[in-house]
Image: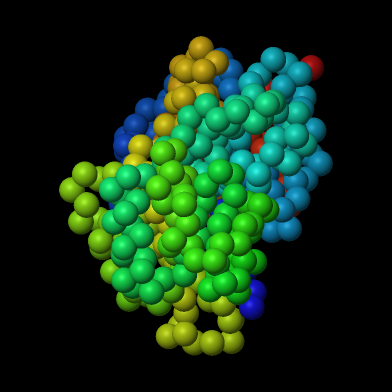
Amino acid sequence: MAVRRGSERPKAGAVASAARSTHARDSSTTASTQRKRVREAVPYKLLAIDLDGTLLDRNGEAKAVDVQAIKKLKARGIKVTILTGRLFSGTRPSAELLGIDGPVGCADGSHVVQVKGQKTLLHHGIRGRAADRLRDSLERNDLVAFLFAEDAIVHDERGADYLPYVRTWSTDLRYAHRVTEHALWDSPEGMTAVVALGREANIGRTVADIQRDKSESMQVSMFPFRRDPDKSREASHWGMVARAAGGTKGTALAWMAAHYGITVEETVCVGDWLNDLPMLERGGRSFAMGQAPAEVKKAATDVLECGIETGGGIAEAIERAFGRGK
């Protein structure tokens, strides 16, 4: 049974800053205003882009105008990276399309991977006692769970109907007899993320279990979606995503800047959704796509005229931040 697409179906990784996220953003409207005053004087050296809703449309395709603009920018010596909610297997095709062989940030900053050689450079994983507490809560609340680890999504028979939903994050889907008994729960590297689906009350109880954790070792958010658009809201299902604390698109952007020996003020980023807020608030100059929610537009230094339906948003951001070039 397919999941309904649209406003009730968050894009890949959008859960990092959804309505009930425990993640606290570290910027303010005043800081955004100050950045607007100095943006024209900064020689930007790195462009970070989101994928779904920014480079990729609803069909997962990039518009030629944006691809060409990015390649021309790279030819000028400007570094380009991707910061996305997708796992690396879902990110790699876009990186290859754009000719990016350096590091990219996946799973909303929880996993940084060098495209060339596919080497992990940074990973925030759910492990140890945090993993045990999460597994116990998932079982107690009878939730359908998916494990995001080793660049794949592990599911069992209960999750089969939801695969059209979770495959947005990664195309590498692996079957297990029972997810909560999988060896990944005891992995030293930990899991990049855990997604759970079920009734709102059950999801809410697991979210509350995580939020009661005094060690603050995980961040979690929940969101509604419908498997059947003809059913009423009472028939709606809910989802949640748990990730290890410490990784956001904002921290990944700072990591990228340090990796290339530049400051965060010398970076430009483009995004469209709530999980992009940490990087939009942290980047030297940030652009919200035309179709972005008001909260996202408010966090960015600039709002683009172009939206994902028409394409050209990244090309517009490049021209406004870096100029036309030669």
Q: Position of residue 10 (x, y in %)?
A: 53, 61
Residue at horizontal 72 percent and vertical 22 percent from the top? 74
To which quarter of the image does residue 151 belong? top right
Image height of 285 relative to 62, above or below: above
Residue at horizontal 53 percent and vertical 73 percent from the top? 158
Of 203 and 258, which appears nearest the observer? 203
Residue at horizontal 64 percent and vertical 74 percent from the top? 2
Q: Position of residue 311 (x, y in %)?
A: 72, 48
Query: Can residue 275 be seen from the camera position used here?
Result: no
- Colouring mode (rainbow / by chain / secondary structure / one colour): rainbow
Q: Position of residue 272 (x, y in %)?
A: 55, 48
Of 81 and 292, which appears nearest the observer? 81
Image height of 96 relative to 255, above or below: below
The extreme top residue here reads 261
Quadrant that contains the N terminus: bottom right
Image height of 269 relative to 11, above or below: above
13 displayed left or right of 240: right
167 displayed left or right of 299: right
Of 145 and 318, which appears nearest the observer? 145
